[in-house]
């Protein structure tokens, strides 16, 4: 940690900061700057740095406190250089093969879910996605079938033998959803719902953690750290688009996030091009981009009849378009020495 | 609702949209555009529009679907022209007087909380703020005292007779927090935690709903709609800064949101300049701006010893600075025909 | 154009809008909405719509004015469905082959420029990039060699027979730069420098128009429209990253912009992964993503000695890394049925 | 400057950085970090730091280079603690009185301009604004009257004796506009048009520098530095809204920018609530906020007949509404110990 004093800071103010550093058991180290003093703080435990930044910033005469290291540790590649592989019902995510999860936004009926599940399996998908508990911006929009939806997902899994990823929205529903799901999804609106993160962290279930639309990559990693710190290291990260001033698409896919995450963390990284664009016309293009950039997997919304979908119809692909996507993505994956 | 067809849409595609509009019991109305067809949809219930936009956008030949009206109704000023007044333990928010809630970010100890409470009351604050359950970006940062903190808040309320606002982070803690708090705060990270919104909506407790950092004003109003739709109309909105590319402050205070919200909704609007700037040096200036813009209240972080604060020290004012803030804000409030 | 009246609009206000529509020679068409009136305006010339939106929005009782069509016409794919091909000194951009322009951020010396030029040609680049007039955020940073730099570029072109792209920053330097450059670059800071756009529009030189960091895709197309409206249709668009709240990279590559632009316009689209990430470690990954998404070309910064570069060293690749990039990009291009 | 090495940096890489620091005549100072080395660079000239950050970031083993001081110097309050006062035709900006510039977006005719000028003077405005050269997003929108508009502005000045602020868009029009204008406006699209900044910097005319919509506060100060470095210290900064994800207003007024700029620079700060909201309904509210926050002046669009305005009608106030704004702003100004 580096404490940068104001140019006008008095010797007493510098001294007070030094004393405080020593009082809490750390070592101050003063850089002999010409214009201003810069104090390095040596010996701080990573786990304490978040609090210490704020602590020292409040001292009179302090201009800024900068961290030298990131605040996450368990999620950091610096302490865990090799890639992590997360197993989802026997399927390895992060092990070279690009994993494609496909299915409808919402589970609507058994007939719909099973039909789509069979179709996406035929096209080569490795996992089923489908929402039973749906976080919808409007209270008047379809809210999902709840446990009934989870049972339908189980049925689709039986028929296709594909593992299932589905969202859990509330800490007291974790046990319920975990009974049915192979991979627990934390949605974008809940990336910083810490009671929920702690609860899934207390299970050994694999977790798909979606980035909050207004959250930095570093905050995504801090949320992953919450889960791992509770004992569950089976975390897959998911870039799903961020809010920006650009309004031609629902979100802006932060494609840079793929190599940045690969640089900063050992956790697998998936991309959700359906939510990140909000428009089926752009999904195939962005899917190929994500795989080319190095993503370990994709989440793609597929619906047998988008105009009749109860949610997210505009961004859902018909099965035949998904089939095209799969064949195109497969070629791109091979071009970057991976398979699908 | 207006459905805009692509210029190349075929007559069959236009017909299919018209047929669907009629099939679901609504009336299509075609505008004779030269370049393309535009179809107005008449008769849709507000409560169904969110789903219908997505529904029609998925039809072949559709370029765009635009809503003519907002998706919120209970929160809308169009259906409720007069200002709502929300009562918090006898204190009226939205009734002309600018309500100031002040106190530390986190409740740390009874001595600290009571001391600050007495100080802010002396300066004229109307409400106490203080966090017992703390949502922290880092799992290693101080997480709050939990129920112990709630009890301390109660003690501070007894001493000062000021009502208390504090955050509830999880749906199954609503009953617990509601036992102690006069005003339930939904924090920025939970603005779209719908199970939590529904749960507070099922109580009759007044709710302070903070805007998500990455959420549009329209999303804030949809979240308010969730609470009101459950039967609880005692909602106060709070602008607390949004994430933008500007990095000299922790967030960007969206001051425009004050008049926009006043135009769109009848609900009271507060502003939190402490989080919206993240820097105590800017809090007084932005507090005055918020009141001048028409805010019904402020949330201000005050700490007796910011460098020793367990959270948010950098943005906390010392009691003497808060006293100055109060006297300055009072003058601005009078200049816009309000009182403090 | 659609004019949406307020719910409380009076019949007189609706009438005034109708009268004005007729007064200026257009036809009003009223939709019989239940809650509010919606008036379609028929017959407006595209070229006038920008002014008309503002015009009608100012009428009392008007809530909103929405455009049905985009404001650009010459750049629109609706009126020009087939892809445009822009020729740069015989090189076809937008014709299937992915065009790679490579070279240093700034031209620093003949030795440097020629050495890099030879290297990037050996790796398969099709065009040289290099700045002679440099727009630098700081007035104290290296500002480029000016005309001397242009002469050096010419030398590098002679040696390698590769065409040259370089930036022009001011309308009165267009003629000078056009004497030396094969492709005139309008930089991100000048995307809305309309005198400059008009000036390059008055030449027949091909133009590379970079997106402004804070500008929407629709604004990029309006700026292209400025150039084309002056008579010069040889416009190549370039996505180079936008400013967002994410701060782990210098900009956020808007990868969605590639398919959106391909949907909206017939103009070729290039991507600049060097500026869009600001970090050489991420350039190769994002280059592959851009090509997979459908970009017609890349602009890549290459420097023989990044630590000694006078600008943009951090985002420059060494020639050997660029060579790797080329071989990887070539494979991705083939996977999407293109060549390099 | 602080150079932060990667945890895996080798002793040779650390040595290479140290050597380079000494080679260019500066002093390295190594902090004995446990996890990684942090090297302070002592003795660098401010004017060179922008280049040096990039220089060292390109060295192998370097994780990050952080600046300790800001890159601007002439604009910095650290070197010039007292407020600067800029004189515009005898009117002092930054001297306590809040200066209000008012008038139409575009000069349309002498009758219009003079009528509005007389009206705003009656309401107490101190300066006239009006555009002769208009930067419009669409090439088909009204582009301004050019020199004819400047002559009309002169006429309005003669009638009212109010100084005139108007925009200059191109470096070779600076002399022309300077003949007529008392205050040269650099518009938001040209904040980083460096040839233009240098040209106005070479005059002694006062300059109103508007913030680019996608530009950080630090970039605004770097652009001011360009002007001052050329010898012209008569710079007034103007916050006019930034682009964010919020779309209920045209831009987001960055009200935080007022106290941040007051902290970082000695230059006067104005706010343009008309462009920052894009909606006349919000202009008065945000005007009061700006003055309460500490702005030294306002730019307000006023039009005698907004629906007939050739540009920016939606955000223009009618003279009677402007009169109300003035009386309200006057009261707020007094509440913060200023006058209007």
Image: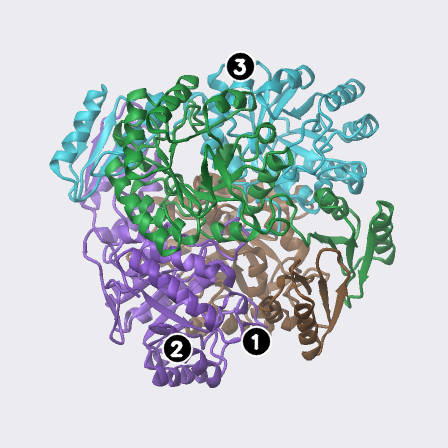
Chain colours: A green, B cyan, C purple, D brown
- What is the spatial separation of the Cα atoms under label 3 and label 2, in whole angstroms? 67 Å
**Nearer to the camera, B48 or B133:** B133
Q: Chain of mark 3?
A: B
- Looking at the rendered structure, the secondary structure element under dot 2 is helix
Respond whether the residues carrying marks 1 and 2 are from the same subunit. yes
Tag shown at residue B202: 3
- What is the spatial separation of the Cα atoms under label 1 and label 2, in whole angstroms? 28 Å
Q: Chain of mark 1?
A: C
Where residue A159 sits: x, y (%)? 33, 25
Check contact, mark 1 vs mark 2: CB within 8 A. Answer: no
- Looking at the rendered structure, the secondary structure element under dot 3 is loop
Where residue D147 sits: x, y (%)? 37, 68
Can I make out residue B215 in this image?
no
Q: Tell me if mark 1 has few (under 14), some (14-19) or many (20+) residues whose alpha carbon lies within 10 angstroms of its own.
A: some
Q: Identify the residue shown where x is 45% and y is 54%.
A: C242
- Residue D212's place in the image compared with A147, above or below, is below
Q: Chain of mark 2?
A: C
- What is the spatial separation of the Cα atoms under label 3 and label 1, in whole angstroms? 65 Å
Question: Which corner quadrant of the image does residue B49 belong to?
Answer: top left
Depth-wise, is mark 3 or mark 1 nearer the camera?
1
Respond whether the residues carrying marks 3 and 2 are from the same subunit. no
- The residue carrying mark 1 is C308
**Nearer to the camera, A214 or A207:** A207
Considering every residue shown, the one lying at the far front of the view is: A90
- The residue carrying mark 2 is C173
- Residue A144's place in the image compared with D169, above or below, is above
Question: Which corner quadrant of the image does residue D57 belong to?
Answer: bottom right
Q: Identify the residue shown where x is 31% and y is 66%.
A: C340
């Amino acid at each position: 940690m580096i404490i940068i004093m104001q140019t006008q800071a008095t010797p007493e103010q510098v001294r007070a900061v030094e004393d405080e550093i020593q009082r809490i058991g750390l070592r101050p180290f003063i850089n002999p700057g010409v214009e201003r003093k810069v104090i390095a703080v040596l010996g701080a435990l990573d786990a304490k740095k978040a609090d210490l930044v704020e602590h020292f910033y409040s001292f009179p005469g302090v201009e800024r406190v900068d961290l030298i290291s990131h605040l996450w540790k368990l999620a950091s590649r610096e302490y865990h250089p090799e890639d992590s592989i997360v197993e989802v019902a026997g399927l390895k995510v992060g092990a070279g093969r690009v994993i494609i999860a496909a299915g409808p936004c919402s589970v609507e009926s058994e007939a719909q879910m099973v039909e789509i599940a069979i179709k996406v399996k035929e096209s080569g998908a490795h996992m089923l996605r489908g929402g039973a508990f749906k976080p919808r911006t409007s209270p008047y929009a379809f809210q999902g079938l709840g446990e009934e939806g989870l049972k339908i997902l189980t049925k689709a899994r039986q028929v296709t033998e594909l593992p299932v990823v589905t969202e859990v929205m509330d800490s007291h529903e974790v046990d319920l959803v975990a009974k049915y799901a192979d991979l627990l999804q934390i949605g974008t609106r809940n990336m910083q719902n810490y009671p929920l993160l702690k609860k899934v962290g207390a299970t050994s279930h694999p977790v798909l953690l979606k980035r909050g639309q207004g959250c930095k990559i570093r905050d995504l990693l801090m949320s992953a750290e919450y889960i791992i710190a509770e004992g569950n290291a089976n975390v897959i990260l998911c870039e799903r688009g961020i809010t920006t001033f650009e309004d031609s698409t629902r979100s802006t896919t932060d494609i840079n996030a793929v190599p940045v995450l690969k640089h900063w963390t050992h956790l697998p990284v998936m991309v959700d091009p359906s939510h990140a664009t909000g428009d089926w016309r752009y999904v195939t293009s962005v899917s190929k981009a994500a795989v080319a950039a190095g993503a370990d997997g994709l989440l793609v919304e597929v619906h047998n009849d988008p105009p009749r979908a109860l949610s997210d119809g505009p961004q859902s692909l018909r099965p035949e378009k998904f089939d095209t996507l799969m064949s195109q993505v497969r070629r791109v994956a091979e071009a970057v020495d991976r398979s699908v």
